């Protein structure tokens, strides 16, 4: 399908594919098995200017947007979603800076992120506040010396590896979610430490850790935007980042589809390759249709984000839900086409099946996002009987 990408977008996609196939493919099983953060690959992504893709030109980036990020994430995920999410979480971490940061804040942090010298992470989730983001308890009390943070964030991608953390904390706990703000915390700040790395089902190359704040003092100038806008900033951030999760899902589904086609051509049963069986052909055809449909929806949502359209919640949620459900279905069918060996770690579809699951969970579970889509439908005017 023609997606009418610009020459620069085609070049970015081509380079991401080359890196994924030549450098990530040979180490992906090892990264997964050892649950190792892919520092060598991250350095390579930095050296090839991949972190510049989603940063504006005035801060030493290439000036790309959501679609450009999606193209890279999709190509990396086609080979290894663990690497892809480590990359994409950097974008997530700097979105508050891009959207609400002052010129001074942007100049201080973005060029280093663009160069891949410092990774970023975004932290809202807490042990008692997952889907219910408004229930966060971490506080950032304003004092004459700065903000004092106390609390624990859970399941933070790039936790421990990133240098820059955009953290949602209550600057006015009496006001609940309306008292939440975005505070930037640098690694190494006294009172800021990390919990143990989580042991995960999939995306094992990525690091997921707790962030612990104990009387952690950060300068007042680390407030991003205004006090009280943390909750709305989080919602807006996810609106523009969810196509990226969709791209992760499309990438892993594409990888599984390709592996299944190759295997079905080679595997002989009853004297013929199994791809000559109509039952297998129809599974592969359905997988291909679903991947194309998911990709089209993800690119359309990403383009809507890039257009500057103010309300992208619905498109963005639809793209994430559809693509992640597709990834789960396609990777499940890929394991089925591989038969018994599909269940073994020696073949890539076992990892893809495990990696796909998270896309239905993070950045809003698919149930919660269906609620949001249904709410839009309930409110929509102009629908006729
Ligand atoms: C590997 C990984 C990486 C992550 N990375 C980050 C990160 O970088 N930064 C960050 O801040 N967070 C991160 N998260 C957190 C992630 O976004 C949350 O796990 C997710 O939003 C779900 O929250 P929860 O786990 O508390 O589940 P819960 O909210 O407890 O949900 C449990 C179940 O209840 C359902 N449910 C809950 N409320 C509703 C409702 N209103 N309607 C219907 N069903 C509902 C859910 O769909 C789910 O099935 C990460 C999580 C994981 C696992």
Image: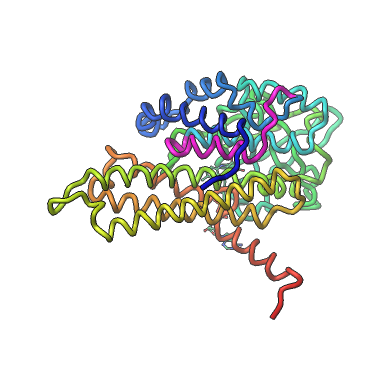
Looking at the image, is 104 positioned above or below residue 384? Answer: above
Query: Residue 210, position in %: x, y?
Result: 56, 37
Check residue 161 for magenta coloring. Answer: no
Q: Give the image's coloring scheme.
A: rainbow
Q: What's the residue at 77%, 48% (across, down)?
A: 173
Q: Is residue 215 left or right of residue 329?
A: right
Q: Quadrant of residue 152?
A: top right
Query: Residue 374, position in %: x, y?
Result: 64, 66
Q: Is residue 157 left or right of residue 106?
A: left
Of the pair 298 and 26, the residue shown nearer to us: 298
Q: What's the residue at 63%, 23% (across, down)?
A: 118
Check residue 76 for magenta coloring. Answer: yes
Looking at the image, is 121 positioned above or below residue 170? Answer: above
Query: Residue 311, position in %: x, y?
Result: 74, 54
Counting every numbered tag in the picture gives 0
Quarter placement of the C terminus: bottom right
Of the pair 75 and 288, the residue shown nearer to us: 288
Query: Residue 190, position in %: x, y?
Result: 68, 24
Looking at the image, is 233 positioned above or below residue 207? Answer: below
Residue 382 shows in the view = yes
Residue 197 shows in the view = no
In this picture, which residue range is highlighted in magenta? Answer: 59-82
């Amino acid at each position: 399908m023609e997606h009418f990408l610009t020459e620069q977008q085609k070049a970015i996609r081509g380079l991401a594919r080359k890196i994924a196939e030549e450098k990530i493919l040979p180490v992906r099983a090892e990264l997964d098995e050892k649950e190792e953060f892919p520092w060598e690959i991250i350095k390579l992504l930095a050296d090839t200017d991949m972190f510049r893709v989603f940063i504006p030109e005035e801060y030493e980036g290439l000036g790309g947007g959501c679609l450009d990020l999606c193209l890279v994430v999709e190509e990396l995920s086609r080979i290894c979603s663990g690497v892809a999410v480590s990359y994409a979480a950097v974008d997530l971490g700097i979105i508050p800076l891009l959207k609400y940061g002052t010129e001074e804040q942007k100049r201080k942090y973005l060029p280093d992120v663009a160069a891949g010298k410092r990774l970023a992470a975004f932290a809202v989730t807490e042990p008692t506040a997952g889907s219910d983001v408004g229930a966060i308890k971490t506080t950032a009390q304003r004092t004459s010396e700065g903000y004092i943070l106390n609390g624990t964030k859970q399941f933070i991608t790039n936790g421990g590896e990133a240098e820059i953390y955009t953290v949602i904390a209550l600057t006015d706990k009496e006001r609940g979610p309306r008292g939440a703000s975005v505070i930037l915390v640098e690694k190494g700040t006294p009172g800021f430490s990390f919990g143990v790395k989580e042991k995960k089902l999939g995306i094992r190359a990525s690091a997921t850790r707790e962030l612990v704040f104990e009387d952690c003092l950060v300068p007042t100038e680390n407030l991003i935007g205004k006090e009280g806008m943390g909750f709305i900033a989080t919602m807006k951030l996810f609106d523009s980042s969810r196509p990226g999760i969709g791209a992760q899902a499309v990438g892993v589904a594409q990888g599984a589809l390709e592996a299944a086609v190759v295997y079905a051509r080679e595997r002989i049963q009853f004297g013929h390759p199994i791809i000559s069986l109509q039952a297998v052909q129809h599974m592969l055809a359905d997988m291909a249709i679903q991947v194309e449909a998911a990709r089209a929806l993800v690119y359309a949502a990403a383009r809507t984000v890039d257009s500057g359209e103010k309300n992208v919640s619905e498109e963005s949620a639809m793209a994430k839900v559809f693509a992640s459900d597709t990834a789960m279905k396609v990777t499940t069918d890929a394991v089925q086409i591989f038969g018994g060996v599909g269940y073994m770690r020696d073949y890539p579809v076992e990892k893809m099946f495990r990696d796909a699951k998270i896309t239905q969970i993070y950045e809003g579970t698919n149930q919660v996002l269906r609620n949001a889509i249904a709410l839009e439908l309930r409110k929509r005017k102009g629908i006729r009987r």
